[in-house]
Amino acid sequence: PTYTSKAFLYILNHGGYAILSAGRNPYDSYDFDLDDSAINRRREQLQNDLIEHAYLFSTIRGVYEGIEETSFFVSLFNNTIEQIYEIMSLGMKYNQESVIYVGQERHQSLVEQQLIYINGALNGSYISGNGFKIFLPSSSMNDNYSEVNVCPVNKFVFTLIFDFNYSYKYDRQRFVQINKSIKRNMSSEKEAVRQANVIPQRQQIFFSVS
């Protein structure tokens, strides 16, 4: 979807979103051997995964630590642990160092932003933060910002605030268990769709016999 600036500001204040990408992982030498077309295909595959899982999302452009990339701002359904780990699983699938998760809260003061590391040296930990900064579209920002198109024809430029002085551990064993459960559920859903497509074909064959 394309948000209004007011709606986008509300989401930043109250949470209920994630940010993930399929771009180059700057800390993985394998990704540096991939050409731009391979990265673009990977981004398209992530977009298809989001559509398949019925997520609403918008494309955002950002520059982080001097590297420009295209990410997806994903609206979340709920605050369940399964949904957090589904977002993490998508990030791992596309070899990302981290994903951003922000649970939905009614009160602005309770919103916690989590930068969750899923690959690399910091894998298994996350950085917490609160709040954000907004910049004028005309600002000469060079690094560490995100930019999303909002209607009618404006750009919303912002950066999330994290406290990099402290890191926290997440339950990796719990992640492994949930991740296996998610994969089983995905396989069951695909099989259900396949069966749903097969049954009408069988019915058609049955009723066409005279």
Image (spheres, rainbow, N blue to C red):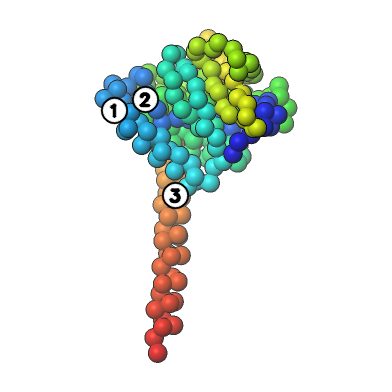
Asked if residue 170 shows in the view, the reply is: no
Residue 34 tag number? 1
- Image vertical order of residue 121 relative to residue 38, above or below: above
Q: Residues within 10 Å of mark 3 (few under 14, many from 20)?
A: few
The x, y position of residue 17, in whole percent, is: 59, 32
Q: Secondary structure at mark 2?
A: loop
The quadrant in which the C terminus is found is bottom left
In the figure, residue 204 lies in which quadrant? bottom left
N-terminal of the two: label 3 or label 2?
A: 2
Kind of residue at disc 3:
Met
Q: Nearer the viewer, residue 39 or 118?
A: 39
N-terminal of the two: label 1 or label 2?
A: 2
N-terminal of the two: label 1 or label 3?
A: 1
Q: Nearer the viewer, residue 8 or 162?
A: 8
The x, y position of residue 130, in whole percent, is: 63, 19
The x, y position of residue 40, in whole percent, is: 37, 33
